[in-house]
Amino acid sequence: MRTMVATGLVLLGASGWLMWARSGSSAAGVDAARGTGVLTTDVARVVAPGRVEAVSEELEVAAEVSGRLSALQVEEGDRVEAGAVIARLEDADYAARVASARAALAVAEAEELRLVNGARPEERREARAAAVQAEASLAQAEREHQRRVRAADVIPREELDRAASDVEVARARQAEAQERARVVDAPARDDERARARAAVLQARARVREAEAMLAKTVVRAPIAGTILHVARRPGESVSVEGPDGAHVVTIADLSVLRVRADVDERDVAHLRTGQSAYVTADAYGTQRFTGRVIRVSQLLGRKNIRSEEPTEKVDTKVLETLIELDPGQRLPIGLRVDAYIAR
């Protein structure tokens, strides 16, 4: 009788231990499903929390210049191609700068052309005529002076001096006219040509700068993708120096979805690229979204995803692992999921 009782107690104790062990294993599985990284003994996979993102990640498209938004040509959910116009800023000021720069360029080019071509034929003839006139005036002054010299005995001394002075003045005017004629006929010097060419290049650079600033009033899509969020509406001002950096819209390429998972440091030895994986989300019940591991970080870091449970360990180190989902599967960007990676 005693033997039967003892045997019953042993069986009862073994049964209780087995139930406790199964309960502990089940709890570990729940923790794994919640993303703590704890592996169950009956499932050969790494479990980690993750978040859905686009293949391009989320790009905040901003204006490159400050101004007032005059037009918005997209709405949330719209599909756009790379380079498509997303929004326009008021551009009157920038267009005026382009016009001013182009006018300055025209002046600089005209100055260079005038310097290269030299004086006009009319200017050359005028300069030569002035030289001839100055030469004639000098001859007349010399003749008058000679007459005064021959009549020196009968004319006042100051009249003779005045005649001599007129000769010197006429001779100086003749030299000036001749020099002027030579300058008009002479080609431009190398330094003058270089200065004129530099002025033209500088004016062209200012035109390109003004045109570039005008082009920046048009906000274009940097990639082909889907508009996820519109941050500004027509009439609102954007500033490149503002806290949001003139953010207009958020865009992402949703052609391929990825999951960035936080794998617990205790499981990093089981990770490698090419491993099969799948993710689940509470909103989709037991539905599995399959994929594969395409990247494993080489640096442990802090958790990116928090479960907000009181028992969660916040000081745990994790290794970022990127899972690319198979084509054709759709999940909202930013959705929290549980990732299961096969060992």
Image (cartoon, grey):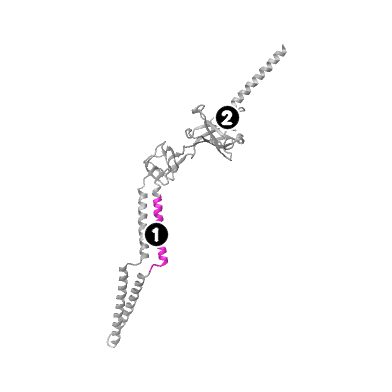
Q: Nearer the viewer, residue 57 or 89?
A: 57
The answer to which quarter of the image holds residue 119 is bottom left
Q: Nearer the viewer, residue 318 or 119?
A: 119
Q: Is residue 268 left or right of residue 231?
A: right
- Label 2, secondary structure: give it: helix
Check disc 1 and give the amino acid type.
Val
> Compared with residue 50, is residue 128 higher up or lower down, i.e. above or below?
below
The answer to which quarter of the image holds residue 69 is top left
Picture coordinates of residue 40, whole percent (x, y): 60, 28
**Measured Cα–Cα span from mark 1 to mark 2:** 71 Å
Specify which label sits upstream in the sequence, 1 or 2: 2
Q: Is residue 139 left or right of residue 64?
A: left
**Residue for badge 1:** 200
Residue that appears at 70% across and 15% down: 7
- Magenta span of residues: 187-212
Q: Main secondary structure of the magenta part?
A: helix
Residue that appears at 46% across and 41% down: 59
Picture coordinates of residue 145, whole percent (x, y): 30, 83
Name of the residue lying farthest toward the top: 1
Check disc 2 and give the amino acid type.
Ala
Q: Is residue 61 magenta?
A: no
The reply to whether callout 1 and callout 2 are in contact (CB within 8 Å) is no
**Residue for badge 2:** 32
**How busy is the neighbourhood of tag 2: few (under 14 within 10 Å), some, or many (20 plus)?**
many
Q: Is residue 201 magenta?
A: yes
The disc placed on residue 2 is none
Picture coordinates of residue 299, whole percent (x, y): 58, 40
- Label 1, secondary structure: give it: helix
Q: Is residue 195 left or right of residue 340?
A: left
Name of the residue lying farthest toward the front: 327
Residue that appears at 57% across and 29% down: 32
